[in-house]
Image (cartoon, grey):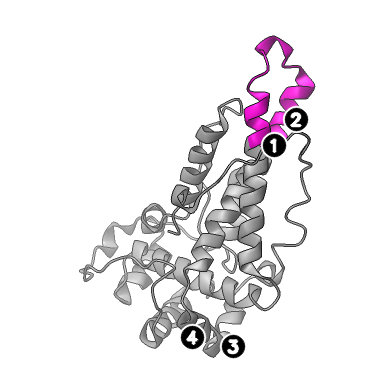
Amino acid sequence: MAARWMMAFVVCGLVVMGGCGDASSTKLAVPAKPLKSAAEPLTDEEMQQFLRLIARLPEGQVPEFTPFEQPQLDTMLPAKMLITEFRGRYRELCDPVRQGQVWDANLDLAKPALQEGWTSAQLASFIRCLSCAVVKQRLTMKHDLKDIEQRCRKEISQVVAILDRDDQRPRSQMTEAFVQQREERVQRLARMIAMLEFMLQLKSVPQSNLELVQKYNSQILPLLPQASTQDPFVEPFADVPVDRQGVVPVGYHEGDSAAN
């Protein structure tokens, strides 16, 4: 459930790309270049290259970052360990190297990318960078992103405090109702960690990328799914109840999380 919720943020503005095949025949020479982070500027040349690449695809639409099987998480772990685990899972989910390996097995996608001079991982990093710019450009018209980030941190602090308090309870007193309530709180923590990680990515997006996205808006819009136009922050802090009685704030500092 947490992984699916995270995907809604990572791939906001992306769609599923079908097709399969052996990519071994696509081993063409591609210049080595660093993968793009959300904080790096996009260029007109890259946008034109990207649009040509998408036009080559059978579906003519932007490919989606695909979910993957993750081990079952022990919800009874201490809150600090849960935070580390959720943060790691989120980052692995949107890792362009991991996604590039998936796309390498899709001949319909890997070959056009190489024809445009991109490896699958380079394409994934560009899509991550572009999608962050698209989402930020849309959300800043309706939301105060700094406020959302602060609310995420506050929610994380509150949930962590409750989990830490619950960890003091003897195992013999952990009833079925208690365990179920803890699982709800852990799910809440997962969502807030994912949202905070994503907000930190958006925070790093330069203004020039927003302007470039606006410039190419009419060309990008037909490539995006209908879901990407929906507001992902409609009541994001009210879907799972959190008991705030006796809460002692626990800091979640930016040093605990990276923007990329």
In the image, residue 33 sits, relative to residue 70, either above or below, namely below
User: Can residue 58 be seen at all in this image of the molecule?
Assistant: no
Q: Which residues are magenta?
A: 161-186
Question: Does dot 1 land on a helix, a strand or a loop?
Answer: helix
Q: Disc 1 vs disc 2: Cβ atoms closer than 8 Å?
A: yes
Look at 28% across and 66% down and name the residue there.
34
Question: Does dot 3 land on a helix, a strand or a loop?
Answer: helix
In terms of sequence position, does the residue under pointer 1 or pointer 4 come before the other? 1
Asked if the stretch drawn in magenta spans residue 246, the answer is: no
Which of the 4 image quadrants contains residue 2?
top right
Image quadrant in which the N terminus is located = top right
Look at 75% across and 23% down and name the residue there.
178
Q: Which residue is mark 3?
A: 218
Q: Disc 1 vs disc 4: Cβ atoms closer than 8 Å?
A: no
Callout 1 amino acid: Arg
In the image, residue 170 sits, relative to residue 113, either above or below, namely above
Q: Which residue is mark 1?
A: 185
Report the disc number at residue 181: 2
